[in-house]
Amino acid sequence: MEQTRLYAHDVPSRPSGEQKNLEGTRVFESKLKNAQTDQLVQAILSLQTEEECYRLFDDLCTIHEVQALAQRIEVARLLRKRITYHDIAERTGASTATISRVNRCLIYGAGGYDTVLDRMEKE
């Protein structure tokens, strides 16, 4: 018997790391932020084409690392469609631990998955 699972769209959430500044405006402070990650983020933001992205990821990451990132995006997309863990594992090859982590990020995370998936759906 499968347990009832909590899905991202079942829980209203505030991105982790989100705080309000003195003016009451919401701001996000990542626990990842430092000079090196700032440089990485700026490098990614400087890319202008799909080919440039592939070239950077080809140089920057192993094939396995890129495949793991791509798998997590697909897991997040399927979770948002309320596909079961079992079906997601069969479709993607992701472990239930990975699926659970992605689901936790969708519910309690910084909102990054939702940002990119919403934008990809509009294209």
Image (tube, rainbow, N blue to C red):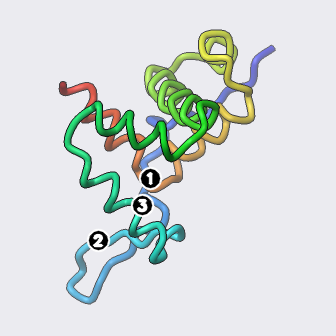
Q: Secondary structure at mark 2?
A: strand
Please provide percent x and percent y for residue 11. 48, 43
Q: Which mark is residue 40?
A: 3
Decide which of 76, 43 is in the foreground and name it.
43
Circle nearer the N terminus (2, 3): 2
Measured in 3D between alpha carbons, the distance from the residue under mark 2 to the one under mark 3, in whole angstroms, is 24 Å
Q: Which residue is mark 1?
A: 13
Q: Which mark is residue 26?
A: 2
Is residue 118 left or right of 38 when viewed as pictured?
left
Write the residue at 73% across / 28% down.
96
User: Which quadrant of the figure contains the C terminus?
Assistant: top left
Q: Secondary structure at mark 3?
A: helix
Write the residue at 34% across / 38% down.
53
Decide which of 70, 123 is in the foreground and name it.
70
Name which residue type carries label 2. Arg
Q: Is residue 21 above or below residue 17?
A: below
Decide which of 39, 23 is in the foreground and name it.
39
Mark 1 neighbour density, 10 Å: few (under 14) some (14–19) many (20 or more): some
Q: Is residue 12 above or below residue 86?
A: below
Write the residue at 22% across / 36% down.
49
Residue at the far bottom: name it: 22
Please provide percent x and percent y for residue 36. 48, 71
Please provide percent x and percent y for residue 39. 39, 67
